[in-house]
Amino acid sequence: MGLDAALHANSPAASPALGAPAVKPPPSDSYVQSFARGLGVIRAFTADAPAQTLTEVAARTGLDRAGARRILLTLAQLGYVYQEGRLFRLTARTLDLGYAYLSTTPLWNLAEPIMEELVAEVHESCSVAVLDGAEMVYILRVPTSKIMTINLGIGSRLPAWCSSMGRVLLSGLPEARVDEILAASDLRAHTRHTVTDPKELKRLITEAKTQGYVTVSQELEEGLVSIAVPLLDRNGNVMAAMNLSGNASRVTAAQMTRKLLPRLQAAAERINTSLRLRA
């Protein structure tokens, strides 16, 4: 299973009932079902399905045609969707939803210039991700040359258990929560190098917490090697992870640890210090 398949398997579009939450909340006055369905319709539009008919949106969200139509027309009136014949597409206004998160995240402003300096120094791609359930989500990325078969950008998701940043993020959680995430994850091998045994994964996550960094070599995709460290809030809790990634034919995990880890840690400490001063 390649990285492209991993991205698809962990994307909202892969779910047959996209509009439904992963765990349906119990009925309560605090849950607005129509709002949740509206978000589900927005999330139905993906890179592999940017334009869809009413029937397709209904099928991908698990809504009936009448319900999907009402939501699509409401989104169109608000400027988040436009209609082109039988097809519906998202508009650029939906970017406001993601930008609202990024613009209120201190990391977005503080980390990027430090990441750019690091990339210019080591000539490897640098990314920052946060944890969302069982997945890590990219919130910053400064690439160099293309080293992966798919394009990663802000908002891209990958399974946390088999990625360097993901394991760093998991290392900051209580053990019981790690168990829950591993139990909920599809522990299938993406390459012949992927660690899929839950006990070994827990050992690696515990090791990440002890040593303060993680290296992952060709577990997500053949030829991809990466090293990650935590970014900490003012209380010392893991709030995000930052990594350097490269091609295994050019740099090994051991070489990354020896040559690049000190520079990655120094950049992370600069970001951590900025976050503490800003808090």
Image (tube, rainbow, N blue to C red):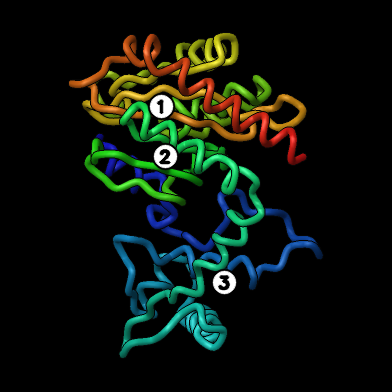
> What label sits on residue 162 in the rendered view?
1
3 vs 1, front mark? 1
Q: Label 3 neighbourhood size at 10 Å, few (<14), some (14-19), many (20+)?
A: many
Q: Is residue 141 visible?
A: yes
Which mark sits nearer the N-terminus, 3 or 1? 3
Residue drawn where x is 45% and y is 73% of the image: 92
Q: Label 1 neighbourhood size at 10 Å, few (<14), some (14-19), many (20+)?
A: many
- Residue 21 falls in which quadrant of the image? bottom right
As shown in the figure, which amino acid type bears the numbered disc 2?
Answer: Leu
**Which residue occupies the foreground of this view, 196 or 149?**
149
Q: What's the CA distance linking mark 3 and mark 2?
A: 24 Å
Q: Is residue 188 visible?
A: no
Q: Left or right: where does residue 246 sit relative to residue 142?
A: left
Q: Are marks 3 and 2 in contact (CB under 8 Å)?
A: no
As shown in the figure, which amino acid type bears the numbered disc 1?
Answer: Cys
> What label sits on residue 38 in the rendered view?
3
Q: Are marks 3 and 1 in contact (CB under 8 Å)?
A: no
